[in-house]
């Protein structure tokens, strides 16, 4: 039997596996393992970054708590100021006339003493009235109460004067001709305007 006709061993016909494919499989597995296990340096950086974020969050929460406390304190202070202001206004309304009333008591005493004297001359009576008027003027001054009495020729001021009539006059138009009744102010507030007659100017 010739060599070409010799039977071939079937085991010899089996092909050996390709080692290149095995290498590719191993490399792929190694890549997958590497992807599942991050680098140690990256792990440390991530941990440090997490600690920084945690610290920043804690600081922010502390700041918020502090601002909230300051807001509550400011609100309480405003409320206290408002209550004190209301109390002051109430007291001012209640006792605002106390000083003025105390100043008027001596005036009343003087008037009663003058009326109690039966035998008085006209001169002594006049002196007593003048003394009482001085007491009254002093009480007005201490309580910022002033009279409004414009002189003839003064410009008419609607804030302090009340015109009763307008009359022809040689004085310029819009000026006071005559005061019929004095006015009074209390701390720049008009209690009673002065009643006046106003010039309409010269008639043609």
Image (cartoon, rainbow, N blue to C red):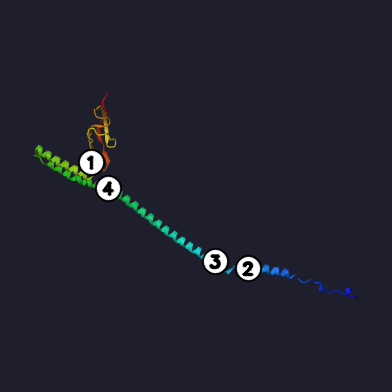
Q: Position of residue 97 (x, y in %)?
A: 24, 46
Q: Which residue is mark 1?
A: 146
Q: Which residue is mark 4?
A: 94
Q: CA distance from mark 1 to mark 2?
A: 100 Å
How many other residues sit within 10 Å of disc 1, few (<14), some (14-19) or many (≥20)?
Answer: some
Res. 191 mark: none
Q: Position of residue 48 (x, y in %)?
A: 52, 66
User: Which of pointers 1 and 2 lies earlier in the amino acid sequence?
Assistant: 2
Q: CA distance from mark 3 to mark 2?
A: 18 Å
Q: Badges 4 and 1: C-beta atoms under 8 Å apart?
A: no
Mark 3: secondary structure: helix
Q: Which residue is mark 2?
A: 34
Mark 4: secondary structure: helix
Q: Is residue 141 visible?
A: yes
Discs 1/2, front: 2
Mark 2: secondary structure: helix
């Amino acid at each position: 039997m010739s060599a070409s006709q010799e039977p071939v061993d079937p085991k010899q016909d089996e092909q050996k596996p390709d080692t290149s494919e095995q290498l590719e499989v191993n490399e792929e597995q190694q890549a997958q393992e590497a992807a599942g296990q991050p680098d140690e340096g990256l792990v440390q950086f991530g941990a440090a970054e997490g600690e920084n974020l945690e610290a920043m969050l804690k600081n922010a929460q502390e700041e918020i708590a502090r601002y909230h406390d300051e807001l509550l304190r400011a609100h309480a202070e405003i409320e206290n100021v408002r209550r004190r202001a209301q109390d002051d206004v109430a007291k001012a309304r209640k006792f605002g006339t106390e000083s003025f009333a105390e100043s008027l008591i001596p005036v009343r005493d003087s008037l009663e003493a003058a009326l109690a004297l039966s035998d008085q001359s006209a001169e002594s009576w006049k002196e007593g009235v003048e003394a009482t008027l001085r007491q009254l003027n002093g009480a007005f001054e201490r309580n910022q109460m002033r009279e409004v009495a414009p002189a003839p020729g003064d410009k008419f001021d609607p804030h302090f004067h009340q015109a009763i009539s307008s009359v022809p006059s040689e004085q310029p138009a819009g000026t006071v001709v005559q005061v019929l009744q004095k006015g009074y102010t209390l701390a720049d507030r008009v209690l009673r305007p002065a009643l006046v007659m106003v010039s309409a100017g010269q008639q043609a």
